[in-house]
Amino acid sequence: MVIDRNHILEILKEVSDPEIPVLTIEDLGILRNAIVDDNGNVTVHITPTYTGCPAMDMIRVNILAALQEHGISNVEVIQSLNPIWTTDWISEDGKRKLKEYGIAPPIEQTTDKSFIKGEKKIVPCPQCESINTELISLFGSTACKAFYKCLDCKEPFDYFKCH
């Protein structure tokens, strides 16, 4: 069997994030590269959303399992911290999936500067799209999310923080 990079990337498009299963590692932008050397050895580069993200070990296992299911076993998964992950890497399809799942996607690019400027962040509710929302906690169900509440429909929701 001839292994090429495009085949590897097609397989990896199916690997989901264990914390947000509607997203793939490609949607999140944490799948950075796949390299196949002349001997058929595969190296997959991933970048965590946060340094120390607990999901990275499971993502590594899921990558290895997905490739093994296709007969590809000479695989190394490398976590790269440089460049650091940014929410700018989330695909438009990934942002749509987040919203449909009930998580407000990042509303701006790169680092959120509203806190530094003393501005209240306006995060639309993913349920009813109202902008009448309030921050409940800077930390939601995971470190990469904040917890908000919609003051119109009264539903709580996570917001995927920009960084």
Image: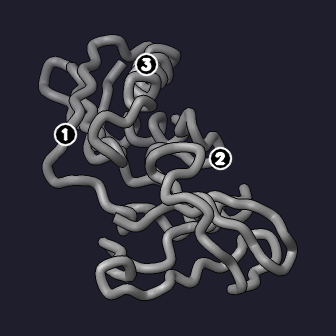
For badge 1, the amino acid type reads: Ser
Residue 152, how many percent across, how many down? 84, 80
Q: Quadrant of the C terminus?
A: bottom left
Residue 26, compared with residue 40, is above or below; it is below
State how the image is colored. Answer: one colour
Q: Earlier in the sequence, mark 1 or mark 2?
A: 2
**Label 2: element kind:** loop
**Label 3: element kind:** helix
Using the image, tell me which numbered label, if any, was put on residue 80.
1
Q: Earlier in the sequence, mark 1 or mark 3?
A: 3
Residues at circles 1 and 3 in contact by the CB criterion of under 8 Å: no
* 158 lies left or right of 109: right
Q: Quadrant of residue 35?
A: top left
How many neighbours does mark 1 have within 10 angstroms: few (below 14), some (14-19), or many (20 or more)?
Answer: some
Q: Give the labeled residue for mark 2.
A: 22
**Label 1: element kind:** loop
Instruction: Identify the residue shown where x is 16% and y is 54%.
Output: 83
Q: Give the labeled residue for mark 3.
A: 61
Residue 75, how many percent across, how many down? 28, 18
C-alpha separation, residue under disc 1 versus residue under disc 2: 24 Å
C-alpha separation, residue under disc 3 versus residue under disc 2: 18 Å
Instruction: Identify the residue shown where x is 35% and y is 12%.
Output: 73
For badge 3, the amino acid type reads: Val
Instruction: Identify the residue shown where x is 50% and y is 84%.
Output: 120
* 129, 116: nearer the viewer: 116
* 12, 36: nearer the viewer: 12
For badge 2, the amino acid type reads: Val
Residue 27, how many percent across, how many down? 49, 54
Instruction: Identify the residue shown where x is 60% and y is 58%.
Output: 147
C-alpha separation, residue under disc 1 versus residue under disc 3: 16 Å
Residue 7, compared with residue 114, is above or below; it is above
